[in-house]
Amino acid sequence: MKSNTKTEALKESNHHDSVLFRESIEGLNIKSDGIYIDATLGRGGHTKGILDNLGKSGKVIAFDQDIDAINYAKLNLTDSRLSLIHSNFSMLENEIIKLNLHGRIDGILMDLGISSPQIDNAERGFSFNKDGALDMRMDQTQKLTAAQWLKESSETEIANALYQYGDEKRSRIIASNIKKYQQNNDITSTLELANLIAKVVKPGKNKHPATRTFQAIRIVVNDELIKLSQVLEQTIGILSGNGRLAVITFHSLEDRIVKQFIHKYSRHKAVPRGLPIPNNQQEKLILKDLSKIKPSSEELHTNRRSRSAILRLVEKC
Ligand SMILES: C[S@@+](CC[C@H](N)C(=O)[O-])C[C@H]1O[C@@H](n2cnc3c(N)ncnc32)[C@H](O)[C@@H]1O
């Protein structure tokens, strides 16, 4: 490979188109000297968007559990206003207390799920299109991999997870196939698993037969839904008065958790921006539900990843 082609390929493998970029940055209502958290740094698109809207004394603290994301930002996003923390966002409150910033954060952004570089890098084991070790860990220091989970789980546990987290109607037959195969072989690669699934699941419209199973296993291996519930509860104490929370979800399980969290802390349905909240209801309100935003038709056209995205915006009262 010529060196400029190599550089292009490297750039491409690190590229991530930030979803709902303008809407989420505008939604944070960034104050020039504010302190913001990007809980899901990825390739830093949203982090850079926040930095670009801050003045000299503003700050961004960015988290990612994937060391590749942190290392990429160290090299490509050098900015004295940016601090990088390699951690699961379920530890957000602890980290913010350590920094003496509890209750002082002006906005938190979460852009959930995995980044394009994580999917594109076959070695990470997230892709059913590329052969790689069946890994799927976002945090490479974690012990449990997808291969291990499949080996250690019973047929019922696998079937239940595929049904619950992947909405996979063929969950039982897939689980049974996996266990039969495992009588003679461990499943160690992504294509090995994808091929096993393809034997018993027909491809959907524009959907690979393994899409739902891979989503379900990824959610289990990274304990994604529990971590999301944990961090959402922590945001209440972390945010300052009028601090904003912007969460971008990519499937209904995530969105339901965010929706229920907002419902729990806001007594009102969507409050149009600028409208006063009636006096007799004010003290019970912890969060003000601002809006639910979907990608524009232009974004849907140019960024496939945005297809199922929903941005929810709330403000702490
Ligand atoms: C969709 S990408 C974020 C992309 C980013 N907004 C951008 O514009 O480049 C999600 C990132 O969040 C990270 N992530 C997901 N769940 C996490 C968690 N519980 N704790 C910390 N990081 C997490 C993933 O490793 C991934 O890098």
Image (tube, rainbow, N blue to C red):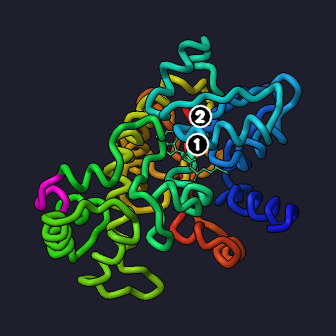
Of the 4 image quadrants, the one containing the C terminus is: top right
Q: Give the residues drawn in magenta, as a range.
A: 153-158
**Counting residues from the N terminus, which is met first, the one under dot 2 or under dot 1?**
1
Is residue 11 magenta-colored? Answer: no
Q: Residues within 10 Å of mark 1 (few under 14, many from 20)?
A: many
What distance separates the C-alpha of mark 2 from that of mark 1? 6 Å
Q: How many marks?
A: 2
Q: As displayed, is residue 227 above or below residue 33?
A: below
Name the secondary structure under disc 2: strand
Residue drawn at x 39%, y 58% as measured from the top left: 134
Q: Is residue 156 left or right of residue 312?
A: left
Quarter residue 76 falls in: top right
What residue is shown with label 2? 63
Q: Position of residue 168 (x, y in %)?
A: 27, 72
Q: Position of residue 165 (x, y in %)?
A: 30, 60
Residue drawn at x 54%, y 20% as measured from the top left: 95
For the residue with label 2, is its CB less than 8 Å from the closest atom of ligand 1? yes
In this rendered view, identify the residue nearer to me: 266 or 64: 64
In this rendered view, identify the residue nearer to me: 259 or 317: 259
Q: Amino acid at mark 2?
A: Phe
Say if residue 260 shows up in the picture: no
Quarter residue 52 falls in: top right
In this rendered view, identify the residue nearer to me: 9 or 77: 9
Q: Position of residue 290 (x, y in %)?
A: 57, 48
Whether the residues at callouts 2 and 1 have beta carbons within 8 Å, the answer is yes
The chief SS type of the magenta part is: helix
Numbered badge on residue 40: 1
Q: As displayed, is residue 164 above or below residue 37?
A: below
Is residue 157 magenta-colored? Answer: yes
Quarter residue 315 falls in: top right
For the residue with label 1, is its CB less than 8 Å from the closest atom of ligand 1? yes
Numbered badge on residue 254: none
